[in-house]
Amino acid sequence: MSAADDLWEKLEKLGFEKEEKPDGFMPQLPADITSLDDRQLMTLYGEYVSWTAYAAMRLVEARTNVRAAKQNLDYSSARAALAASTEKTVAGRKAAAAADDHVQEDEKRHLDALALAEGLEMVHKNAEARAQFCSRDLSRRQNSGADSRYSKWGT
Protein backbone atom coordinates (compact mmCIF):
# COMPACT_ATOMS: atom_id res chain seq x y z
CA MET A 1 0.00 0.00 0.00
CA SER A 2 1.40 3.38 -0.99
CA ALA A 3 1.49 6.37 1.33
CA ALA A 4 -1.28 7.99 -0.74
CA ASP A 5 -3.45 4.87 -0.46
CA ASP A 6 -2.96 4.89 3.30
CA LEU A 7 -3.94 8.57 3.40
CA TRP A 8 -7.18 7.92 1.48
CA GLU A 9 -8.05 4.98 3.68
CA LYS A 10 -7.86 7.33 6.69
CA LEU A 11 -9.84 10.07 4.91
CA GLU A 12 -12.57 7.65 3.85
CA LYS A 13 -13.04 6.70 7.51
CA LEU A 14 -13.74 10.40 8.11
CA GLY A 15 -16.43 10.37 5.40
CA PHE A 16 -14.46 11.79 2.47
CA GLU A 17 -14.36 10.13 -0.92
CA LYS A 18 -11.81 10.50 -3.69
CA GLU A 19 -12.79 12.94 -6.39
CA GLU A 20 -13.67 11.18 -9.62
CA LYS A 21 -11.75 12.23 -12.70
CA PRO A 22 -13.96 14.51 -14.79
CA ASP A 23 -14.71 13.32 -18.31
CA GLY A 24 -12.22 14.07 -21.04
CA PHE A 25 -9.67 16.81 -20.55
CA MET A 26 -9.78 20.14 -18.76
CA PRO A 27 -11.50 22.58 -21.14
CA GLN A 28 -9.77 25.59 -22.57
CA LEU A 29 -11.04 29.08 -21.90
CA PRO A 30 -12.67 30.61 -24.97
CA ALA A 31 -10.85 33.56 -26.49
CA ASP A 32 -13.90 35.72 -25.68
CA ILE A 33 -15.72 34.56 -22.56
CA THR A 34 -18.50 37.08 -23.21
CA SER A 35 -19.48 35.00 -26.27
CA LEU A 36 -20.86 32.34 -23.92
CA ASP A 37 -24.42 32.62 -22.68
CA ASP A 38 -25.08 32.32 -18.93
CA ARG A 39 -25.86 28.60 -19.10
CA GLN A 40 -22.69 27.82 -21.08
CA LEU A 41 -20.59 29.92 -18.70
CA MET A 42 -22.07 28.22 -15.64
CA THR A 43 -21.38 24.81 -17.21
CA LEU A 44 -17.78 25.82 -17.93
CA TYR A 45 -17.41 27.13 -14.37
CA GLY A 46 -18.71 23.80 -13.01
CA GLU A 47 -16.20 21.90 -15.13
CA TYR A 48 -13.33 24.01 -13.79
CA VAL A 49 -14.52 23.50 -10.21
CA SER A 50 -14.55 19.73 -10.81
CA TRP A 51 -11.07 19.81 -12.32
CA THR A 52 -9.80 21.96 -9.45
CA ALA A 53 -11.10 19.48 -6.87
CA TYR A 54 -9.66 16.53 -8.79
CA ALA A 55 -6.27 18.22 -9.24
CA ALA A 56 -6.17 19.12 -5.54
CA MET A 57 -6.78 15.50 -4.57
CA ARG A 58 -4.10 14.24 -6.94
CA LEU A 59 -1.69 16.94 -5.71
CA VAL A 60 -2.08 15.78 -2.11
CA GLU A 61 -1.42 12.21 -3.22
CA ALA A 62 1.68 13.33 -5.14
CA ARG A 63 3.04 15.31 -2.20
CA THR A 64 2.49 12.31 0.07
CA ASN A 65 4.36 10.11 -2.40
CA VAL A 66 7.22 12.65 -2.57
CA ARG A 67 7.68 12.41 1.19
CA ALA A 68 7.60 8.60 1.06
CA ALA A 69 10.09 8.53 -1.82
CA LYS A 70 12.41 10.88 0.09
CA GLN A 71 12.21 8.66 3.15
CA ASN A 72 13.07 5.59 1.02
CA LEU A 73 15.98 7.47 -0.58
CA ASP A 74 17.34 8.53 2.81
CA TYR A 75 17.08 4.94 4.08
CA SER A 76 18.79 3.38 1.07
CA SER A 77 21.51 6.07 1.18
CA ALA A 78 22.17 5.37 4.85
CA ARG A 79 22.33 1.60 4.23
CA ALA A 80 24.70 2.09 1.30
CA ALA A 81 26.90 4.41 3.38
CA LEU A 82 27.08 1.79 6.13
CA ALA A 83 27.99 -0.86 3.58
CA ALA A 84 30.80 1.40 2.39
CA SER A 85 32.27 1.63 5.89
CA THR A 86 35.61 0.42 4.57
CA GLU A 87 36.03 3.84 2.94
CA LYS A 88 38.33 6.00 5.07
CA THR A 89 36.60 9.35 4.54
CA VAL A 90 33.04 10.60 4.84
CA ALA A 91 33.26 11.88 1.27
CA GLY A 92 34.33 8.41 0.13
CA ARG A 93 31.39 6.76 1.91
CA LYS A 94 28.97 9.31 0.43
CA ALA A 95 30.38 8.77 -3.05
CA ALA A 96 30.12 5.00 -2.68
CA ALA A 97 26.55 5.30 -1.42
CA ALA A 98 25.59 7.62 -4.31
CA ALA A 99 26.96 5.07 -6.78
CA ASP A 100 24.86 2.26 -5.30
CA ASP A 101 22.28 0.89 -7.78
CA HIS A 102 19.47 0.86 -5.20
CA VAL A 103 20.22 4.46 -4.21
CA GLN A 104 20.19 5.44 -7.89
CA GLU A 105 16.76 3.81 -8.34
CA ASP A 106 15.39 5.53 -5.22
CA GLU A 107 16.81 8.86 -6.41
CA LYS A 108 15.00 8.45 -9.74
CA ARG A 109 11.74 7.56 -7.97
CA HIS A 110 12.11 10.64 -5.76
CA LEU A 111 12.82 12.92 -8.73
CA ASP A 112 9.87 11.45 -10.66
CA ALA A 113 7.59 12.00 -7.65
CA LEU A 114 8.81 15.60 -7.33
CA ALA A 115 8.22 16.27 -11.03
CA LEU A 116 4.67 14.89 -10.83
CA ALA A 117 3.91 16.98 -7.74
CA GLU A 118 5.22 20.14 -9.41
CA GLY A 119 3.23 19.42 -12.57
CA LEU A 120 0.05 18.80 -10.58
CA GLU A 121 0.60 22.02 -8.64
CA MET A 122 0.66 23.93 -11.93
CA VAL A 123 -2.46 22.13 -13.20
CA HIS A 124 -4.27 22.83 -9.93
CA LYS A 125 -3.38 26.53 -10.00
CA ASN A 126 -4.46 26.81 -13.65
CA ALA A 127 -7.81 25.10 -12.99
CA GLU A 128 -8.39 27.29 -9.94
CA ALA A 129 -7.52 30.47 -11.86
CA ARG A 130 -9.88 29.51 -14.70
CA ALA A 131 -12.71 28.80 -12.24
CA GLN A 132 -12.13 32.18 -10.59
CA PHE A 133 -12.13 33.90 -13.98
CA CYS A 134 -15.50 32.33 -14.84
CA SER A 135 -16.85 33.19 -11.40
CA ARG A 136 -15.88 36.84 -11.82
CA ASP A 137 -17.65 37.03 -15.17
CA LEU A 138 -20.75 35.36 -13.72
CA SER A 139 -20.74 37.91 -10.88
CA ARG A 140 -20.23 40.76 -13.33
CA ARG A 141 -23.20 39.61 -15.36
CA GLN A 142 -25.39 39.26 -12.29
CA ASN A 143 -24.44 42.68 -10.94
CA SER A 144 -24.82 44.50 -14.26
CA GLY A 145 -28.38 43.36 -15.00
CA ALA A 146 -31.45 45.53 -14.47
CA ASP A 147 -32.64 43.18 -11.74
CA SER A 148 -29.26 42.97 -10.03
CA ARG A 149 -29.12 42.93 -6.27
CA TYR A 150 -27.70 46.47 -6.30
CA SER A 151 -30.70 47.81 -8.18
CA LYS A 152 -33.00 46.50 -5.45
CA TRP A 153 -31.53 48.74 -2.75
CA GLY A 154 -32.98 52.11 -1.81
CA THR A 155 -35.94 52.42 -4.19
Image (cartoon, helix red, strand yellow):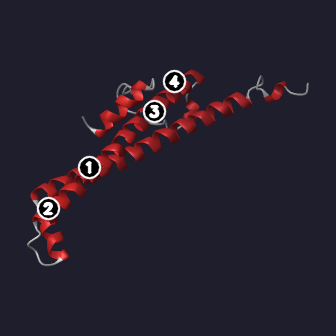
Q: What residue do we see at 34% from left, 27% from top?
A: 24
- One can see residue 154 in this view: yes
Asked whether, in this view, residue 23 is left or right of residue 69, the answer is right
The spot of residue 127 in percent (x, y) is 46, 38
Tell me which amino acid carries mark 2. Answer: Ala
Please say if 89 is above or below 78.
below
Return the residue at label 4: 43
Q: CA distance from mark 1 to mark 4?
A: 39 Å
Determine the residue positioned at 8% across, 72% down. Answer: 86
- Residue carrying label 1: 69
Quadrant position of the N terminus in the picture? top left
**Count of all numbered marks drawn on residues in the image:** 4
Q: Nearer the viewer, mark 2 or mark 4?
A: 2
Q: 146 and 52: which one is in front?
A: 52
Residues at circles 1 and 3 in contact by the CB criterion of under 8 Å? no
- Can you see residue 17? no
Task: State how far apart marks 2 and 4 are (Cα).
Answer: 55 Å
Tell whether label 4 touches label 1 (CB within 8 Å).
no
Q: Quadrant of residue 61?
A: top left
Q: Nearest the camera: 29 or 5?
A: 5
Q: As drawn, is 88 to the left or to the right of 152?
A: left
User: In terms of secondary structure, where does tag 3 sit?
Assistant: helix
Work out how far the residue at label 2 is from the one at label 1, CA to CA, in angstroms: 16 Å
